[in-house]
Image (cartoon, rainbow, N blue to C red):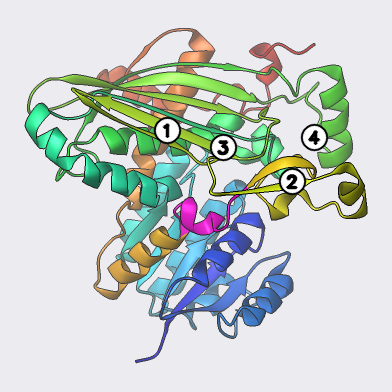
Amino acid sequence: MSNFKLGFIGAGFIAHFQATALKQVRGVDLAGVYSPEGGEELSVYAQGCGLGTCQVFPSVEELCKHVDAVAIFAPNFARLEHMEALVAAVKAGAPLKGIICEKPLGRTVAEAERMVALAAEAGIPTAYFENQLHMKAMQAAKAQLAPQQAAMGPMTLSRCSEEHAGPHRGWFWDPTQQGGGVLADMGCHSIAVGWYMLTPNGKPMDFLEPVSVTADVALLKWGTPHYRKKLLADMGVDYSKTPAEDFATGLVTFRNPETGQLVKAQFTNSWMYDKQGLRLYMDGLGPGYAYEMNSLVSPLEIFIGDEAAEAVADAETALEKSTATRGLLPVVPNEPDLYGYVDELIDAVQAFQTGKDGMANMAYGLEITRLCQAAYLSAEQGRTIDLTSAAVQQELKSYISLIAQGRGGEQLHIM
């Protein structure tokens, strides 16, 4: 049997990270890539890793003719354009078995709804990539606590955070291109995994009904003069004109439709974590049981003194988004596996091979987008958003946050 052929749209940071994860997935080739930039580099990398030919194609349409499934890893502002091209290719006869979309599904609810509608037109399975849902630590926590949950009742509080010192590319810092700041970038992860961990075992992903969202956002680090100047010099983005939030926190309340019980998911995210690098911290509490996970608790530590650090400076070899090259450094030996990238790829491929959606599909991605946008609305208006209100749901359909409009200066404090 020949290997499953996967194609990438996009060749940036996440595409390279996913290609690295793909080395650990059996029976799958990275057969092709389409990207306005970096396609050749990704192709060389993939071939060097033994992932297959990874041919560089001139268009989405040509890519779709030569692969079994396509993963959209392009920037947020280009998602709809690529999805439209994908669907056109399927309608023209491209034999795709599935479409993957990296988070977020859309920058707004309207964009996410359009993505779901396009997927329905294509009539093929989808997978929405929220890697943290697939983390082995999260899966093990659910499995390990299943007997306690059955005896004592489901989890009632989850607390999830993701923090680092900021993105790699300028468009990610630009709220008009990305769709916001850290809440759009990482809040989707924390909200999704919080919802998932609260969901009783054996129930669908969307079993718990969202009731309300309360959130706050702020510009705490990158709005100060020193860091504004650095951001402009390094990324070409001027936060004195179009700022985005670098800190977000909030609380989503869910209702169990069978028992009426209310449970809570707390999220905290920042682009101002200047310690070792990317940190995921998650914990959850149930009646008589709990779990806790910290991605920076590593079995491997490295020490690099000043003299050695001056000789070689390569911060991210130890940890994604690392800001240090010396001192005592935690080293994550297998980041793609730790963060869930390997398992989400396995899940999507296995699902597509049997004609099914991935664990999370695009319809689920729409719901995560809705919760993120409700959080922006809450922070903007300084109130709790009632998600059971039909009027609120209608408002969210056309809502674009002030920050995403490039009007963050009306909301965020800038020194």
| Front-lying residue, 384 or 346 | 346
According to the picture, the residue beneath numbered tag 3 turns out to be: 279
**Percent coordinates x, y for residue 23 in the rendering:** 52, 72
Q: CA distance from mark 2 to mark 3?
A: 19 Å
Count neighbours of disc 1 (C-alpha within 10 A) and say few if under 14, some if 14 to 19, many if 20 or more. Answer: many
Mark 1 or mark 2: which comes first in sequence?
1
The answer to whether marks 4 and 1 mark residues whose Cβ atoms lie closer than 8 Å is no
Mark 2 or mark 4: which comes first in sequence?
4
> In the picture, residue 343 is in which quadrant?
bottom left
| Front-lying residue, 366 or 102 | 102
Of helix, strand and loop, which one carries label 1? Answer: strand
Q: CA distance from mark 4 to mark 1?
A: 31 Å
According to the picture, the residue beneath numbered tag 1 turns out to be: 282
Residue 336 magenta-highlighted:
yes
Q: Which residues are magenta?
A: 331-341
Count neighbours of disc 4 (C-alpha within 10 A) and say few if under 14, some if 14 to 19, many if 20 or more. Answer: many
Q: Residue at x 40, y 53 (%)?
A: 128
Residue 354 as seen in the image, left or right of residue 316: left
According to the picture, the residue beneath numbered tag 2 turns out to be: 303
Mark 2 or mark 3: which comes first in sequence?
3
Count neighbours of disc 3 (C-alpha within 10 A) and say few if under 14, some if 14 to 19, many if 20 or more. Answer: many
Q: Is residue 314 above or below residue 396?
A: below
Mark 4 or mark 1: which comes first in sequence?
4
Q: Nearer the viewer, mark 2 or mark 3?
A: 2
Of helix, strand and loop, which one carries label 2? Answer: strand
Q: Nearer the viewer, mark 4 or mark 1?
A: 1
Q: Residue at x 63, y 63 (%)?
A: 16
Determine if residue 205 is in view. no
Mark 4 or mark 3: which comes first in sequence?
4
Work out which residue is located at the far top of the displayed protein and give it.
382
Q: Is residue 407 above or below residue 291?
A: above
The answer to whether marks 2 and 3 mark residues whose Cβ atoms lie closer than 8 Å is no
